[in-house]
Image (tube, grey):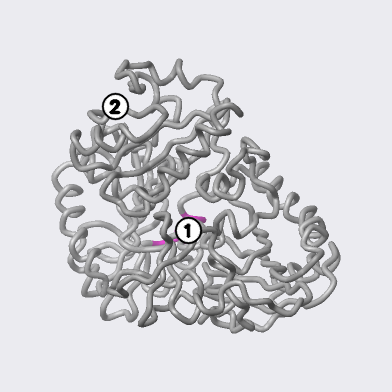
Amino acid sequence: MATFAELLGPTLKSSGGDVNTTEALSGKTAVALYFSAHWCPPCRGFTPQLAGWYTSDLKAKGLEVVFVTGDRDEAAFNEYFGEQPWLALPYGSDVIDGLNTKFKVQGIPCVVILDGEGNLMTKDGRSSISADPTGEEMPWKPKTLHEILDGAKLVDKSGSELDAASTLRGQVFAFYFSAHWCPPCRGFTPQLAEWYTSDLKAKGLEVVFVSSDKDEAAFNEYYAEQPWLALSFADRKRKEQLSTICGVGGIPSLVIVDTDGSFISKEGRGAISNDPTGEEFPWHPKPVKNLAQGPGNVNGVPTVVAFCETCSNATEVEAAMTPLAAQYIDEAKAAGEEDPKIGFIIVTSAAGMSSRIRTMMSMEALPPALHQHPLEKKSAGGGWGCDGCGGHGEERFRCTQGCDFDYCGECNAKAGSASEAKLPKLMLVDIPDNGAYYEGPEGEVTEATVQTLVNNYLAKTLERKQLG
């Protein structure tokens, strides 16, 4: 474990000048790394709140805050830090980029909480502190899933209350985060209910509805359409705890939990949608992820992507990538890391995100795949994006069965068109590095070609390109 000086550098800034990092943070109950910037309106809204809580209670209880700037020039940094009552990394510190990468900061304001020894408590410190601004639960170590479920009540279709811990013990189950007001949820819920009733319940899957409805009447109306269990609507605090531990960023979201309480997949919607009869139940992730099941951790780690939409040998390509992918996963587990150093994805369908990723990498576009249901022309309006090209055309064709799926007029016309068979193509995308990507070889994919691409990336001998 790195010391604070190793993590943050030897000195920090205070209102009175430079201070020694080790001395400044010695004996603290918790240290909050505050990723923020003066140009960011949400940051400017949150900073006065955090400063008030820090001054009133949190500093006295042992919290220190270290501002990690995202400002674009030193004058803006100085002006913004002048409003803050805590410490800061010096502007231009060479550890700032490393901290953003280490903690996978994807948006600001972001608060990462460490305990007094430098152990990570939570990457969602903003929510933790906002829910406990006087610091009663400092250093805000998140509860485990077992702890969250201890004492929780579930309801079944008869209206009976069940103890969550005993009901779900030894069971593969999925938390279904959804709400009646959400159109994509209302499209997906009947599909999931059909799959559950026809096959998945018999295969051993239980589902627990975790509602984001706005009131209990809406919850009751929506739950009446669902054939599984539900978390008691009254337990809003536990709902928030589950959303946090499951990493829910939007709904509908399906998170699959194993019999021992560990997470199998936080992208269960993609896994089940691609296997609705449960042939691969309980959908343990493979070392090489298929893009059709979601983007995985591509936003957080450099990822090798194999484009095989029109290839007949995609299985062989996946096999060639698997040994190195498994090696990185094993190394991450041994080091106690959440994500591997390098991720691996194979693309076998032109549907979904494939077209957008190709466009971002300036690759040749392929005709989009046919959607599984018929589409019908709708008013274009606003607030939608084409699932083929990612754009917004003057025409909009939407799924007739309620899926959150749209094609613009051009993609709808091209959907399902034959495409010339192409050789597999390897690429490497590094979104954490400000949206970088690197071109790999085209043609036969072997363990050696995959290893060479990764080695060249790590050695920084590849030409860096910028995602569009």
Is label 2 in a helix, a strand or a loop? loop
Name the residue rendered at 80%, 70% in the picture. Answer: 452
Circle 2 Cα neighbour tier, 10 Å, few/some/many (<14 / 14–19 / ≥20): many
Rendered location of residue 267, percent (x, y) = 52, 48
Q: Residue 104 bears which disc, if any? A: 1
Q: Quadrant of residue 79?
A: bottom left
Name the residue rendered at 55%, 56% in the picture. Answer: 294
Q: Residue 385 bears which disc, if any? A: none
Res. 172 in view: no
- Asked whether 210 or 361 is in front, the reply is 210
- Where are the magenta residues, as a range? 5-11
Q: Are marks 1 and 2 in contact (CB under 8 Å)?
A: no
Quarter holding the N terminus is: top right
**Residue 53 shown in magenta:** no
Q: Which residue is mark 2?
A: 232
- Asked whether 380 or 165 is in front, the reply is 380
Q: Amino acid at mark 1?
A: Lys
Rendered location of residue 175, percent (x, y) = 44, 36
